[in-house]
Image (cartoon, rainbow, N blue to C red):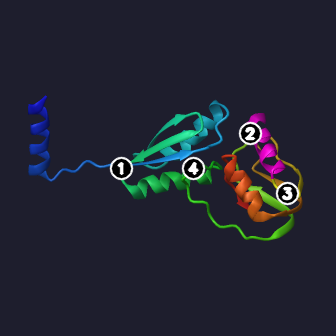
Amino acid sequence: MKSITLLTAAIIMTTGLTVSAETITLKGLHNCCKSCEKGITAAITKVEGATVVITKDVAAITAKSKADADKAVESLLAAGYFGEGAPVGTVEDKKVKSATVTGTHLCCGKCVTGIDDAIKTVAGATKHTAEKNAKSFTVEGDFNLKDLHAALNKAGYNGKLE
């Protein structure tokens, strides 16, 4: 074993070869079914060389560099997922009567239930139009846009709010 380690060290020293990888772990992802897991995996592996290990609501994303790991996280966010450790993004802190949410992952009834549960935590939000496979949905009531964004993120979802 020592000879293999020494040989590896000698090759690295003489060739200048470096081996490095960056891992980012996100917790609290919405992952209720195989379609969610496939969606998470597909989003991350769009970035060349990026891989992911998913355990329930945790994704460990590994890429060859920090820049590539960050790109994989961006791809995951664009696919409608969110996990603690991802950049939160900015949403205007203002009261609204209605907001349209686009780009959130909604593959099944459990995803819709997750959205419903998240919206119920937003003070003043009274109803929504989220349904299975929808590309967008509307939230109505008298609520703060930033609170809606935070509730969706806490439930493991991401989306654009307008």
| Residue 72 relative to residue 116: left or right | left
Q: Secondary structure at mark 3?
A: loop
Residue 60: percent from left, percent from top: 48, 42
Q: Earlier in the sequence, mark 4 or mark 2?
A: 4
Q: Amino acid at mark 1?
A: Lys
Q: Quadrant of the N terminus?
A: top left
Q: Earlier in the sequence, mark 2 or mark 3?
A: 2
Q: Which mark is residue 142?
A: none
Magenta region, mostly helix, strand or loop?
Answer: helix
Q: Which residue is mark 4?
A: 76
Q: Secondary structure at mark 2?
A: helix
Q: Amino acid at mark 3?
A: Ala
Q: Secondary structure at mark 1?
A: loop
Residue at 64% in and 34% down? 35
Q: Residues within 10 Å of mark 3 (few under 14, many from 20)?
A: few
Q: Which residue is mark 1?
A: 64
Q: Secondary structure at mark 4?
A: helix
Residue at 84% in and 48% down? 120
Q: Which residue is mark 3?
A: 123
Q: Residues within 10 Å of mark 4 (few under 14, many from 20)?
A: many
- Compared to residue 91, the image places residue 114 above or below, namely above
Q: Is residue 162 visible?
A: no
**Residue 62 falls inside the magenta stretch:** no
Q: Nearer the viewer, mark 2 or mark 3?
A: 3
